[in-house]
Image (cartoon, rainbow, N blue to C red):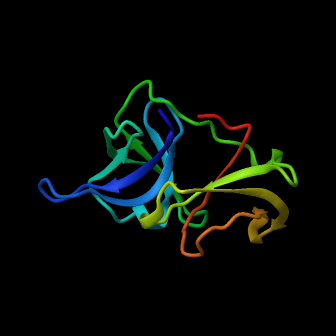
Amino acid sequence: MFAIVPVMSAGEEGGETTPLSSGFIISGDGKVVTSFKVIIDKRDLLVRRSDSSFLTVKGFIAADADKGLIILQAEGNNLPFISLGDSDKVKLREAICVISSMPSAAGQISTGVVSAFRELKGGLKALQITTPVTKKASVRRVLTRRQRS
């Protein structure tokens, strides 16, 4: 089972589910990190696992609109998860992969390397990467080889 998951909007009375964003299960008890902008005003959310089963999202734990992230609480116990990394440990030219959060391409993966670091306002650090990413993607998940699901 992979810890990289699409977050879906439940369909009306047996209707189709709609992909909204990709995310990560970050704890065995069902915490999921995903895109704030895409998820914040949605209700009846589901997380689809790699075996095609669904977890119901019970609510959200934390949100940061400035960083574009929200942590959801989905049902579940002993789920496979991926550990969050430390961006201060990322090295120049380190191999990475990026997971799309676009609804039409949620979960698609591109590979590249870290090509530079940039300092942003407020003391934030951004990674400049050499991988194709759709401009409309609201949040891009970046994984290194040191992170495991």
Residue 116 picture quarter: bottom right
Q: How many marks?
A: 0
Seen in the image, is 136 located left or right of residue 128? left
Which of the 4 image quarters holds residue 43? Answer: bottom left
Residue at figure coordinates x 70%, y 42% from the top left: 85
**How far across and down, in percent of the image, does residue 114 sit?**
80, 57
How far across and down, in percent of the image, does residue 16 sit? 22, 58
Q: Is residue 129 depicted above or below 90 in this figure?
A: below
User: Can I make out residue 66 in this image?
Assistant: yes
The quarter of the rendered structure image containing the C terminus is: top right
Q: Residue at x 82, y 67 (%)?
A: 119
- Residue shown at 49% from the left, 30% from the top: 80
119 over 23 or under it: above or below: below
Q: Nearer the viewer, residue 106 or 68?
A: 106
Q: Position of residue 74 (x, y in %)?
A: 37, 40
Residue with the most extreme top position: 78
Q: Which residue ends up furthest to the bottom in the rendered image?
A: 135
114 with respect to 17 (left or right): right
Q: Is residue 70 visible?
A: no
Identify the residue at the far right of this view.
Answer: 92
Find residue 9 and report its horizontal and vertical position in percent: 30, 57
Q: Is residue 138 above or below residue 145?
A: below
* Residue at x 16% of width, y 59% of height: 12
Task: Decide which of 91, 29 is in the foreground and name it.
Answer: 91
Tell me: 134 left or right of 7: right
Q: As displayed, is residue 20 above or below residue 72? A: below
